[in-house]
Amino acid sequence: MLLPLPEDWGRALAIVAHPDDLEYCASSAVARWTAHGKSVAYVIATRGEAGIDSMDPAEAGRVRTQEQIASARAVGVELVEFLDHPDGEVEYGRKLRADLVHAIRRHRPEVLVSLNPHLNTAGGGPNMADHRAVGTAVLDAARDAGNRWLFRRSSPDDLEPWDGVRMVCFAASPSPTHSLDVAEFVEAGIAALKAQHTYIAGLGEGSIPSTTCATRCRGRAAEQAYSWPSNSRCGPFRAAGHRWAGGRRWPGSLGQEVPHVLTQRR
Ligand SMILES: [Zn+2]
């Protein structure tokens, strides 16, 4: 039984590795939140430049940047930032951690949204290295952003610490515990996904989310939404089931299974 995802907050920051990550996993939820007056901004670690086999990375990065911005607009998000880490080669380390801490200090969110940081996807296959690196770094940055002695920048452009992150939500988790009804916002989510048409076209036939994946989505509307014409192959995607897992109190130990939804210190 999935718990309803708490919505007693006003400002969220979604941080993921690639253009398309949020569109496959969380954009209908984002549409719900922005429709309800919440502020949501996106930070994308790469520009997805290595994601289209038939397109030179420089061109792919330019195209996917524009498609990501269009996707964000489709669900009411105006602010999209790119950190320009190398697509496919994102490294967990000090640079990534610092960039995410600084993003959190700039945006001062109550809620962070990211993508499954586990070794395996919800479908049981191997999760991509970039997703693991960024998801884990998001979790760490949620805590580190509140420590004024970590990841300082040279004055005068240093940022005030921010310890106001109350919850970190990982979409597409293999062990979800929370969900959100997005029946009214599925169309917006689909529009966001379709805005990435160059990327989707580059994947070729059979890479559209399937009804098999859709069974993981909550609600009939969501299931319909992802019953796109396809040959029922999931490909590399996760379905856009808006599920978050949770249960462990903050701070979780990264030496163990990474916790999913964290309630921080309150
Ligand atoms: Zn991705």
Image (cartoon, helix red, strand yellow):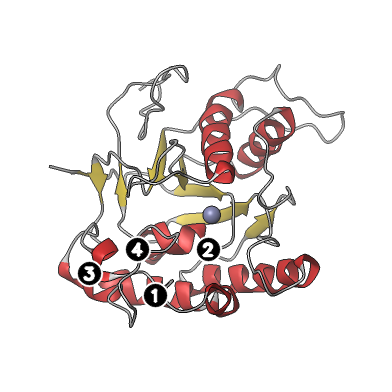
Q: Which residue is mark 4?
A: 32
Give residue 123's position: percent from left, percent from top. 32, 50
Residue at point 33%, 47% (across, down): 122
Q: Identity of the amino acid at label 4?
A: Arg
Q: How many marks?
A: 4
Nearer-N-terminus badge (2/3) = 2
SS of the residue under disc 2: loop
Give residue 15's position: percent from left, percent from top. 55, 47
Q: Which residue is mark 2?
A: 20
Nearer-N-terminus badge (3/4) = 4
Alpha carbon distance from label 4 to label 1: 13 Å
Alpha carbon distance from label 2 to label 4: 18 Å
Alpha carbon distance from label 3 to label 4: 17 Å
- Asked if disc 2 is less than 8 Å from ligand 1, the answer is yes
- Asked if disc 3 is less than 8 Å from ligand 1, the answer is no
Q: Identity of the amino acid at label 1?
A: Ile
Q: Of the numbered discs in the image, which one, if any, rests on residue 190?
A: 1
Residue at point 53%, 65% (across, down): 77
238 relative to 156 in the view: left or right: left
Please report contact status of discs 3 and 1: CB closer than 8 Å, yes or no: no
Give residue 57's position: percent from left, percent from top. 76, 65
Nearer-N-terminus badge (2/4) = 2
Q: Nearer the viewer, mark 4 or mark 1?
A: 1
